[in-house]
Image (cartoon, coloured by chain):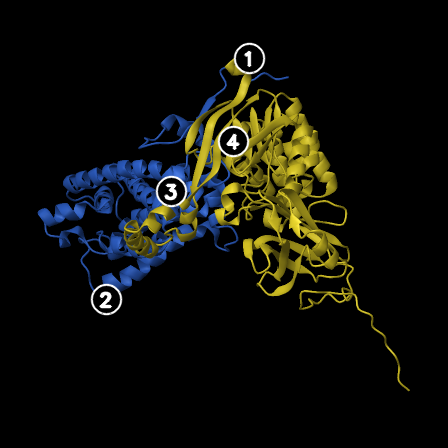
């Protein structure tokens, strides 16, 4: 008879009350589940697609082509003196990362209802792993960006290392919004109807197809920078092509992300108790 | 025994669900808005307040029990008794509304085999994914991988997407992963209804091994023979409460007997009988099959008995007790009273106070297949009606073997008599 050690993990069952923080120790304990769910999302996404993971590259390429024709050639939108395709692509990459993460995470809880109603694990793992899975696409498309820059003979400097924290900021922004929306979507399926419009509006509210200089400096620019993607996109352009560093914009955007993330986590934890009963 | 020797200790666990909310839950924002408006309206009316309380149901009420380390405990109960809710709370899928519990050790829950299986992934990939979901580390899965594949008997298809598996293969693989989970506490719900008889035997064997290894097992099943085989002790749950905890043989007995009483029988509680019925007090109405057992279903080709039990608190003159037999749509089929025959009518001009049973045998080949409603009436003709309940009990009639059932078409009508047909060829 194998003995259960006295030190065996004690699990306490009790009604959950009030607001709970996030239990990082527990998340660490479940790190392999995070890994496997992320891995599943990546694996499944391109299964039985003839072009497979190439879609990770094709999607930004096609969007760049379309926006370049519409906004660059037909509407002749300014692009801070850069070739329009490069200008757009540099913004589309973090934008796609954000958009896909947001879309995937907001429906993630409902999509994994069978897990939620059968097995215990920290629920935050689900939106988290769906965001992490998108990072792989992003990494692949980043290579595309560097190739494009080489084609247009634009140098890549050490400043490009800034892309790492900027990417993290985009991921956290998507996760923050994803936490809110996924928890709400469990209760109100309206969310999944709203998300496509939300990302559309959000895209035009970010300096992707137009330069940030279009937005007048001052109060309006500050308000505009509350959109986390403003800071991220400006940061990307600065890290890749130089110009004035977006200190101020980035500071406001980061603050907005932190605020969204903290409230999102608390909201998620509060809603979490009822997921299995409601989903 | 010190606390550490218990794997599971729960104290007064209760779980409340909002059922009203399940039906009229605001699934969309529009519903939310209209519901809120209605609710405001209702809060002004008494009816609205009464309804609020009715919106919730206690799926579990004040459950207290403990399980020693290494014990296999069965949980039996009818559908809706709260078994699944209890397992969900123990496996932490949902939180209790009230109460406190402690589990010592890792809890593995098998509320359903194949949780998290993805059809697009191969058998190999699903073993890893499912293992991780069930709480195994990658190392553990790797070390048991060959065993799992062996057990599942899917061998050569291990690198095929599981969507191409037959349902049998799929379930075998799913069970194999689950069976190789090695938590200190295993919570199992009805997983043995998987695969063919051979595989089921193998699964039962595996479950038995788990219990032998000193792990604590909580086992829910409708299959009484597996309960008896795998557990020493069982809890009987009913309406969210623990009715009995006893050695499994005793618990199963208790449960089965109780199960028989429940259907085909209706009792009247004191508070269900209006005061105006006195001195008549209905106690029960039941349907007994040919062999005398109380049953929800009787056969058309066999006689059965309708039994009405009642008490009289005073002597009564001219009392007749009887029933209406109706279709579920309320169409009357026939009515009969216990003093219909002139002999009994003469024998019982009055009944002394006491407890009575009036029994009526419905002859074989009377009713057609379907569901029927029994109403009860107790009255003194032209003097007074003491008690009437038009929906006292429902029961079913099974027509197998009745005339004409070699054609599988449904026959309209409440009765299905055996009739004498003759076929003559006229010259």
Q: Around disc 3, counting alpha carbons within 10 Å, would you say few (fewer than 14), some (14 to 19), or many (20 or more)?
A: many
Farthest-out residue, top: B2
**Of labels 3 and 4, the one closer to you:** 4
The hue in which chain A appears in the rendered picture of the protein? blue
Specify which label sits upstream in the sequence, 2 or 3. Answer: 2
Residue A235, compared with residue B418, is above or below; it is: above
Provide the chain ID for the residue under circle 4. Answer: B
In this rendering, the answer to whether B84 lies above or below A110 is above
Query: Do marks 2 and 3 share a chain?
Result: yes
- Between tags 4 and 1, which lies in front? 1
According to the image, label 2 marks what residue? A74
Quadrant of the image occupied by residue B205: top right
The residue under label 3 is: A131
Q: Which residue is mark 1?
A: B1
The yellow chain is: B
Which chain letter goes with mark 1? Answer: B
Gap in Å between the C-alphas at discs 2 and 4?
56 Å
Q: Nearer the viewer, mark 1 or mark 2?
A: 1
- Can you identify the residue that label 4 sits on? B135
Query: Up-down: is A277 above or below A73?
Result: above
**Distance CA(mark 2)–CA(mark 3):** 35 Å
As drawn, the residue found furthest toward the left would be A218
Percent from the top left, x then y, of residue A225?
A: 18, 45
């Amino acid at each position: 008879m194998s003995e259960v050690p006295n030190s065996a993990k004690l699990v306490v069952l009790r009604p959950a009350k009030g607001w709970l923080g996030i239990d990082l120790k527990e998340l660490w304990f479940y790190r392999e589940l995070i890994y496997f769910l992320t891995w599943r999302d990546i694996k499944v996404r391109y299964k039985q697609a003839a072009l497979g993971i190439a879609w990770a590259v094709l999607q930004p390429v096609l969007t760049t082509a379309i926006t370049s024709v519409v906004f660059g050639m037909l509407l002749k939108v300014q692009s801070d003196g850069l070739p329009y395709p490069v200008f757009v692509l540099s913004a589309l990459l973090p934008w796609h990362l954000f958009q896909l993460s947001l879309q995937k995470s907001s429906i993630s809880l409902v999509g994994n209802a069978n897990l939620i109603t059968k097995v215990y694990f920290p629920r935050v793992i689900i939106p988290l792993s769906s965001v992490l899975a998108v990072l792989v696409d992003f990494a692949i498309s980043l290579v595309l960006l560097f190739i494009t820059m080489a084609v247009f003979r634009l140098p890549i400097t050490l400043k490009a290392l800034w892309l790492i924290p900027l990417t993290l900021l985009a991921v956290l922004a998507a996760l923050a919004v994803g936490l809110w929306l996924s928890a709400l979507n469990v209760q109100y399926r309206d969310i999944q109807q709203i998300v496509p419009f939300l990302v559309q509006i959000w895209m035009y509210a970010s300096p992707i197809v137009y330069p940030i200089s279009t937005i007048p400096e001052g109060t309006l620019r500050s308000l505009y920078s509350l959109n986390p993607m403003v800071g991220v996109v400006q940061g990307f352009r600065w890290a890749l092509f130089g110009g004035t560093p977006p200190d101020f914009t980035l500071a406001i955007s980061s603050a907005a992300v932190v605020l969204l993330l903290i409230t999102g986590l608390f909201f998620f934890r509060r809603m979490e108790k009822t997921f299995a009963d409601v989903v | 025994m010190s606390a550490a020797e218990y794997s599971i200790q729960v104290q007064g666990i209760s779980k409340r669900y909002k059922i009203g909310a399940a039906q009229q839950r605001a699934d969309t924002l529009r519903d939310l808005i209209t519901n809120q408006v209605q609710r405001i309206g209702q809060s002004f009316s008494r009816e609205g307040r009464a309804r609020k309380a009715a919106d919730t149901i206690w799926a579990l009420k004040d459950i207290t029990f403990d399980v020693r380390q290494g014990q296999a405990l069965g949980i039996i109960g009818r559908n809706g008794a709260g078994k699944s809710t209890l397992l969900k709370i123990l496996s932490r899928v949902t939180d209790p509304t009230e109460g406190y519990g402690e589990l010592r050790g890792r809890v593995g829950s098998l509320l359903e085999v194949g949780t998290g299986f993805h059809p697009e992934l191969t058998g190999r990939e699903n073993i890893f994914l499912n293992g991780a979901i069930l709480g195994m580390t990658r190392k553990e899965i790797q070390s048991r991988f060959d065993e799992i594949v062996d057990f599942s008997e899917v061998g050569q298809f291990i690198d095929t997407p599981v969507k191409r598996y037959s349902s049998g293969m799929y379930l075998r693989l799913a069970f194999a992963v689950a069976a190789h989970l090695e938590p200190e506490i295993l919570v199992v719900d009805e997983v043995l209804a998987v695969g063919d008889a051979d595989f089921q035997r193998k699964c039962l064997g595996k479950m038995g091994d788990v219990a032998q290894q000193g792990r604590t097992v909580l086992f829910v099943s409708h299959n009484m023979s597996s309960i008896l085989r795998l557990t020493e002790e069982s809890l009987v749950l009913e309406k969210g409460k623990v009715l009995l905890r006893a050695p499994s043989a005793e618990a199963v007995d208790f449960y089965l007997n109780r199960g028989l009483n429940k259907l085909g029988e209706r009792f009247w509680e004191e508070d269900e009988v209006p005061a105006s019925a006195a001195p008549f007090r209905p106690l029960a109405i039941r349907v007994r099959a040919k062999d005398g057992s109380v049953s929800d279903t009787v056969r058309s080709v066999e006689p059965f008995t309708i039994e009405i039990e009642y008490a009289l608190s005073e002597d009564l003159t001219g009392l007749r007790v009887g029933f209406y037999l109706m279709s579920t749509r309320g169409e009357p089929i026939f009515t009969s009273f216990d003093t219909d025959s002139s002999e009994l009518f003469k024998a019982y001009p009055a009944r002394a106070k006491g407890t009575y049973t009036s029994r009526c045998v419905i002859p074989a080949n009377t009713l057609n297949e379907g569901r029927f409603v029994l109403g009860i009436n107790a009255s003194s003709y032209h003097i007074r009606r003491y008690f009437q309940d038009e929906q006292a009990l429902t029961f079913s009639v099974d027509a197998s073997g009745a005339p004409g059932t070699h054609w599988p078409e449904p026959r309209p009508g409440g009765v299905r008599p055996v009739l004498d047909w003759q076929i003559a060829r006229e010259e």
